[in-house]
Amino acid sequence: MSFLGQSALGVDATDGTLKAVKLVRRGRRVRLVGSWRVPYHRQADLLSGTLEALRMFSSTVRPDGLTSVVVSAPDHQHFSSTYLVPNMERARLSEMVRYEVLSQLGVPAEEALVRFHARKGVSEQQVHAVAFDRLKIDDFQESLRAQHFPFDEIHPPGFALASFVEHEHPLGRDRILLGVGETASELVLLREDGVWTRHLPFGLRAESSSARLAERLASEIGAAVAYQLPDDTPFRPADLVLTEEGALSAALTTELGRAMALPITRFGELPHIATAKHLNRGGATEPQTLAMGKAIGLALTGLGLARLPCPLVQGNPRRTAARMLPMAGISLGVASLGLFGLTLLATQRAEALNAALAHDLPGEMQSLYRRSQQTRAELGALQARADDLLTLAERRPAVLGMRAALARLAEVVATRGSDTMHVNSAYLAVGDATHPARLTLTIDTDPARDETLGDLLSEAFRGVFTDVTVSGPEQAPSPKLSRWVMEITLP
Amino acid sequence: MKWLTAGLITLFFCAVATFVTVGLTANERARTESTDLLRRIETTREAWINIPPVSYSETEALAAEWIRLEELGNQRLSMLTDRRYAPIAENLEAVLDRMDLATLQPGTPLRNQLVSWAADDPRTEATLSSLFSLVHLGGLEEVESLDRRKQAHLKIPDLTQETFELVVVSEMEGILDFLEQLAPGRGEPILSVTGASLRRIDETLWSTTPESLSSPPVRLWVRLEAHQLESAANASSEQGL
């Protein structure tokens, strides 16, 4: 698994050549990003050669912890069969399959490693069971761990080959799958009601002639069909699918087609697996890569896309945990960001609530109201002060009005001739904001002038003072004199 | 990978620690603030009901009007108290000593009264000094009486008030000059007339010619007010004038 997808490495080292492919899955798309090939068939001891090839491969490729590594089980002879079993609980099914396989093999339970894959139907299920030599599988597992080869599963190579063909070229008819390697071959019989696999301990190197090898393979296929498949249903294969090194041999293909009288299917391309532009090829050509059926099937198993997943040894807790790291890391990151975000949101919310409404708004309203009332009260006092100061200043023209009024009166007095006419009194009352300043002039004069004096006085003050009231004549306190009174409103 | 894992775990623990120490506190604070906000809303709602609304624009208009009236009053006050036209402040005794009027000679009742008032209050002394300087400058022939009155027409803030009633005798021209000098605009103390009365004294001396309006002597009764700045009065008091 990577941050953006899931990756798996399928490693097959059962037929004299280590073949490995790396697939990456993103959603429903599968991409082939690398293939490696390490021949070891020339070594005398094939098991040690297998381990040496695996060591070289791991030192070269160094599979990371995020990639699921599925290794094919070393296959010398294994048992394979398919049972039709009514639907039942898994534990009960497991017990029944185990019993059935052991009874067919006739070996003690501790010597056989029994695994199966169940395909559920409506009322019954197909159970594809395999049994390997437990001791050899344990030895192989220990050897891998001893040389620190990282792996997640050990898988039957036959089921891997079947999964590859079912994924890339499903036909829905009876088929024969044959993976012919340098030193061993893997035979898979696909029928509508089951899968049967068989390990053939010979390969390309067993016979110098392709025709003889083809005849030998055909003989083994015939024996397997006769021995392994139930007789209730006829086996009519539609074709023979040839993979591994045998698929690279045109002669073998021809001879095998002739011997089996069947069309031979080889993979010139992978219909459902895209190939990366920059394919990492570790000693494998494109035809060799396309022929790595078992390795591709193992990688498909690691991606969870195998039709027949049946791990013999499953689970490496540390590697499984390591593959959880990206998701765990993302989860931790998201959780951390979430916590930081929650902290930030809580802080911002507290600040927003704090600032939502002024804390002392009622106090401010009260203060504003009092201040406005106080200002209104002070405005009256200030207006009165300004008015009083204006009244005080306006006393000046009132005082000056005395001289102006007397000057106008002097013009009338100038016309008196020998008659008596004099100002008895002048009274000045300075006004205020509501009352204008008033000047009251009292004139005592000869009664002979009474007829014309009123008009003369009015005429004299007109044009200078706007509001002049002339009253008289009246009897003055002095004998033989008339009194005239003028009320003058000063500006 | 190990470093990345360790970094992520450290980041997570930092986030947890931050959330526990800051986030939970902030959350609790937000809850408290929410409760406070509800309480403030309720208090504000009650305030809206109980306190008559006052708009800021209205308050600003009131403040602007307050400033305008304050400045208007200060402007008028500064014009009335402009010291450029104020006479030089003198001691009352010195002013009286320069005058040769009979009623103001040392030992006369009026002089004694004036000196007594001046001794009581420096503001009164300043007013009397200013008043009798004008009497002296106007060349008035006689000062009959000077009385103090308690009643004042204008009581203006920042200004002290005193009211006097003065009776003087002189020719018409001198009387009118003197009366016109008792007008505001000559600085402090601000002397102003609130009422005045002119009367002939002796009818037998009345003339029959137009020019004789200014003669014979005229008796002037004048009621006047004197205003002084409170601050100036305080300063005068401190200086012992």
Image (cartoon, coloured by chain):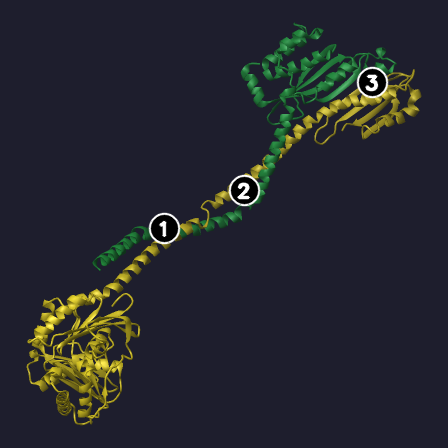
- What chain is colored yellow? A
Q: Quadrant of residue A319?
A: bottom left
Q: Spatial distance from mark 2 to mark 1, Cα to Cα?
A: 33 Å
- B218 up-or-down from A54: above or below: above
- A228 up-or-down from B38: above or below: below
Callout 2: residue from which chain? A
The earlier-in-sequence mark between 3 and 2 is 2
Callout 3: residue from which chain? A
Q: Residue flagged by tag 2: what amino acid is it?
A: Tyr
Q: Nearer the viewer, mark 3 or mark 1?
A: 1
Q: Nearer the viewer, mark 2 or mark 1?
A: 1
Closer to the camera in the image, A233 or A36: A36
Which residue occupies 18% across, 86% down? A251
Disc 3 element: strand
Q: Spatial distance from mark 3 to mark 1, Cα to Cα?
A: 92 Å
- What chain is colored green? B
Q: Residue flagged by tag 3: what amino acid is it?
A: Asn
Q: Spatial distance from mark 3 to mark 2, Cα to Cα?
A: 60 Å
Q: Quadrant of residue B177?
A: top right
Q: Give the side of residue B29 with respect to residue A157, left or right.
A: right
Residue B135 in the image: x percent, y percent?
70, 13
Disc 3, disc 2: CB below 8 Å? no
Q: Residue flagged by tag 1: what amino acid is it?
A: Arg
Where does the C terminus of chain A fall, quadrant-wise?
Answer: top right
Q: Are marks 3 and 2 on the same chain?
A: yes
Q: Are marks 3 and 1 on the same chain?
A: no
Residue position for label 3: A424
Residue B141 in the image: x percent, y percent?
74, 10
Query: Is residue A110 something one can see in this rendering?
Result: yes
